[in-house]
Image: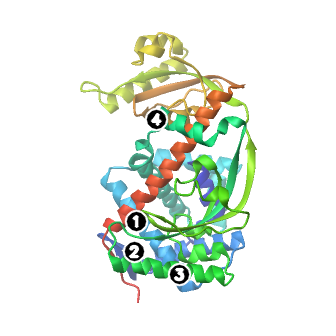
């Protein structure tokens, strides 16, 4: 997630210091009003992003509507997070800000000074990062943690995509989505078809794909010119898998129909990637499970106490044997052996990958309970079959997350009450 915050930082958060807020209501999302000052701030940021990409600026009214839709969706997600009790405390927020500052070779104090010297309100910047973290946790809770990849799916993937051969095509893609609501009425489908015709006419007249995407696309990447970045074939949404390999450089696909609407894809560039050695991690952990007798708070507190004892000099392996609720690893002093990418659940692997050699994690939670994790060693191992399976599982999971996230966001928007107050 840190990459997201760095991205936000580098693009600039247009929260100008001492700006006079405008109190005109331009939209209502469920029971929450959206003010023109919010729209102006986000629009200013998006304009800066478009200029940095060197892309053509859409007409003001078109861009304003696109930005308003993104702002509405942001409010809806924050509302859902609040209903689900998802919050980000100041400690977590400050830790993320320190990492952002560190990635820019600054202390948090220096980072704050630079922002304020450039005219940004630091308090507003903090809240924008807090919102990004909340939305990230919401999406993880609602979508990412529910995605499961079976061994059969991996087997089928390897059989049909032949990634064992040592290389796989990777594609740089642009995307336009003209959405169609779930259970759409005929007039709604017709309205989407009319927008699609407008998009196709603009492309035929020579307007760049990125500019058209910024102006008309309903996709999550619309305001980035529809840029999906580089995708391996296995990471492509399932509806694109048969289409993209047949495209030539610079080609735009025929209209692709899916449950979410009408899609157009442009292939910017493609390349073949060589398979590299597998980076494996040797780690140990102590697990405390929750049940009717052990609450989350009690499990966390037990591990916090064990962590303090280890920092004071006690042996990790001995404490794991005595206290871990994972019988398979406890007998080995908590050792999990050598793990390849994709072998652990994502929330565990994320923590493991973030640790330096010999570093012990803070107490964290996974779907299995509360953990304390110690990274003991790392190596590169030539394990072609294991690597291919791990890569396949990762690609399938990413594809399923993107498809389900798009569906979830569309459902969230369709079920919301939205009223526009703009003249």
Labels 2 and 3 touching (C-beta < 8 A): no
Circle 3 residues within 10 Å: few <14, some 14–19, many ≥20: few
Residue on which disc 2 sits: 34
The numbered mark, 2 or 3, whose residue comes first in the sequence reads 2
Rendering coords of residue 304 (x, y %):
44, 26
Q: Nearest the camera: 404 or 321?
A: 404
Q: Nearest the camera: 404 or 23?
A: 404
Circle 1 residues within 10 Å: few <14, some 14–19, many ≥20: many
Residue on which disc 1 sits: 75
Measuring 40% from the left and 65% from the top, which residue is drawn there? 75
Query: Circle 4 — which element?
Result: loop
- Left or right of 2? Residue 27 is left
Circle 4 residues within 10 Å: few <14, some 14–19, many ≥20: few
| Residue 167 in the image: above or below residue 55 | above
Measuring 41% from the left and 51% from the top, which residue is drawn there? 138
| The disc label shown at residue 197, or none | 3
The numbered mark, 1 or 2, whose residue comes first in the sequence reads 2
The numbered mark, 3 or 1, whose residue comes first in the sequence reads 1
Q: Nearest the camera: 145 or 301?
A: 145
Residue on which disc 4 sits: 150
Q: Nearer the viewer, mark 2 or mark 3?
A: 3
Measuring 51% from the left and 11% from the top, which residue is drawn there? 332
Residue 58 in sight here: no
Rendering coords of residue 287 (x, y %):
43, 23
The numbered mark, 3 or 4, whose residue comes first in the sequence reads 4
Distance, label 2 to label 4, CA atoms, is 43 Å
Query: Circle 3 — which element?
Result: helix
């Amino acid at each position: 997630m840190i990459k997201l915050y760095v991205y936000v930082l580098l693009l600039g958060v247009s929260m100008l210091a001492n700006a006079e807020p405008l109190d005109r209501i331009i939209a209502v999302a469920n029971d929450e009003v959206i003010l023109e000052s919010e729209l102006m701030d986000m629009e200013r940021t998006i304009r800066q992003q478009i200029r940095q990409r060197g892309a053509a600026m859409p007409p003001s009214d078109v861009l304003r509507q696109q930005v308003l839709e993104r702002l509405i969706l942001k409010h809806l997600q924050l509302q859902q997070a609040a209903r689900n009790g998802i919050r980000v405390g100041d400690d977590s927020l400050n830790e993320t800000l320190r990492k952002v500052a560190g990635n820019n070779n600054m202390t948090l104090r220096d980072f704050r000074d630079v922002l304020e010297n450039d005219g940004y309100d630091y308090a507003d910047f903090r809240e924008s990062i807090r919102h990004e973290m909340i939305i990230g946790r919401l999406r993880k809770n609602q979508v990412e943690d529910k995605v499961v990849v079976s061994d059969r799916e991996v087997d089928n993937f390897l059989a049909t995509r032949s990634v064992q051969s040592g290389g796989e095509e990777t594609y740089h893609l642009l995307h336009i989505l003209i959405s169609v609501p779930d259970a759409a009425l005929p007039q709604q489908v017709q309205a989407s078809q009319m927008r699609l015709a407008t998009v196709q006419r603009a492309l035929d007249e020579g307007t760049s794909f990125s500019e058209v995407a910024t102006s008309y696309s309903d996709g999550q990447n619309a305001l980035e010119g529809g840029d999906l970045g580089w995708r391996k074939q296995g990471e492509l949404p399932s509806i694109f898998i048969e289409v993209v390999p047949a495209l030539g450089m610079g080609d735009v696909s025929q209209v692709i129909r899916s449950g979410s609407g009408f899609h157009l894809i442009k292939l910017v560039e493609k390349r073949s990637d060589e398979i590299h050695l597998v980076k494996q991690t040797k780690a140990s952990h102590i697990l405390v499970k929750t049940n009717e007798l052990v609450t989350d708070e009690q499990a966390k507190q037990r591990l916090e106490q064990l962590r303090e004892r280890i920092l004071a000099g006690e042996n990790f392996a001995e404490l794991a044997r005595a206290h871990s609720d994972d019988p398979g690893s406890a007998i080995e002093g908590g050792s999990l052996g050598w793990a390849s990418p994709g072998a652990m659940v994502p929330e565990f692997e994320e923590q493991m990958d973030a640790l330096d050699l010999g570093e012990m994690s803070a107490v964290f939670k996974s779907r299995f309970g509360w953990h304390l994790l110690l990274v003991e060693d790392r190596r590169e191992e030539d394990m072609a079959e294991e690597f291919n399976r791990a890569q396949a599982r990762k690609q399938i999971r990413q594809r399923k997350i993107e498809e389900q996230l798009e569906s979830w966001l569309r459902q969230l928007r369709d079920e919301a009450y939205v009223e526009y107050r703009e003249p």
